[in-house]
Amino acid sequence: MISEAQGNTASSAALESTVAEAGTRRGLKIELLIVLGLSLGQSGIYAIVNLIDKMTRAPLGSQTTSLNNSLNQRQYFDLTYQLLDIFFGLVPVMLVLYLLWRIPGGSPFARLGFDLARPVRDLGWGTGLFLAMGVGTLGVYAAGRALGLTTIIVPAALDDYWWTVPVLVFSAIRHGILEEVIVVGYLFERLGRLGWGKWQIILACAVLRGSYHLYQGIGPFIGNVAMGVVFGYVYSRKGRVMPLVIAHALLDIAGFVGYALVGTAIGLGS
């Protein structure tokens, strides 16, 4: 028979556990808001405002969106700014890896599958996703342009210097790491801890991915939501973010570097 003192102790322990759990959930939500506010959530807000600005100026189809713009008219200052932009763009990734490192259970790199443990398999999956998403991206862009829902996209507007191609490659890798580690790996882990279901997480992350591409028009939003669903599903099955990083980096390298070579032939920039 449980004594009154034992009952009070058990009740107190249960209450403390409930309060601790509520505090943890609240802390996770605050952490999510801060991380997104410093990274791609902020980009999504700016992209929405930018889209509204464009739509109230002229039809989207008549406007141009330039990526990878020159940051200074002087060559080596431009290079310096480009490299600084790439480096500081990866700081949110360092932040989420640090936050995950604080959780007992091993390396955050291994937890997210953001490592070199399976290089051949990751490269194979990454290349396959790149080919599938690349064809889809071109199709969505062409359809968006035909319907007037997508701006003219110029993937690389840098001046032609000896370092232009390497910087474009580094920029592409930066985007792949930033987006896949945060929008897939980190959010899947955190939202899962908050009790979200698999498809809730996949769809929420896909919509976030689409939101920060809205400055390019409605078409890229739809295309990136679809890409986010595919990437999220693959991650939910494989538990590795590296194939997604590889696929994303290859997509951006093809877009940024390939634009100067075959962009006009495949309809980009027009």
Image (cartoon, rainbow, N blue to C red):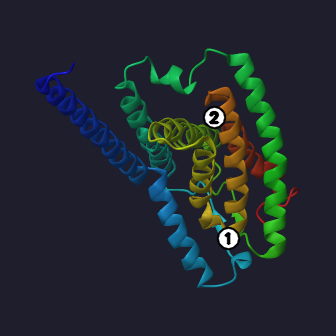
Which label sits in the foreground, 1 or 2? 2
Residue at the (65%, 84%) spot, across then down: 58
Visible residue check, residue 72: no
Left or right of 266? Residue 71 is: left
Identify the element where label 2 is drawn. helix
Crowd tier of the residue under label 1, counting other residues whose Cα lies within 10 Å: few below 14, some 14–19, many 20 or above = some
Visible residue check, residue 18: yes
Q: Where does the image place residue 50, in percent across and percent down from the top left?
A: 54, 71
Q: Where does the image place residue 59, in percent across and percent down from the top left?
A: 70, 82
Q: In the image, what residue type sits under mark 1?
A: Thr
Identify the element where label 1 is drawn. strand
Crowd tier of the residue under label 2, counting other residues whose Cα lies within 10 Å: few below 14, some 14–19, many 20 or above = many
- Residue with the most extreme front position: 1
- Residue with the most extreme left position: 5
Closer to us: 112 or 129: 112
Q: In the image, what residue type sits under mark 2?
A: Val
Q: Where does the image place residue 159, in percent across and percent down from the top left?
A: 62, 54
Closer to us: 71 or 91: 91
What residue sits right under mark 1 in the picture?
A: 64
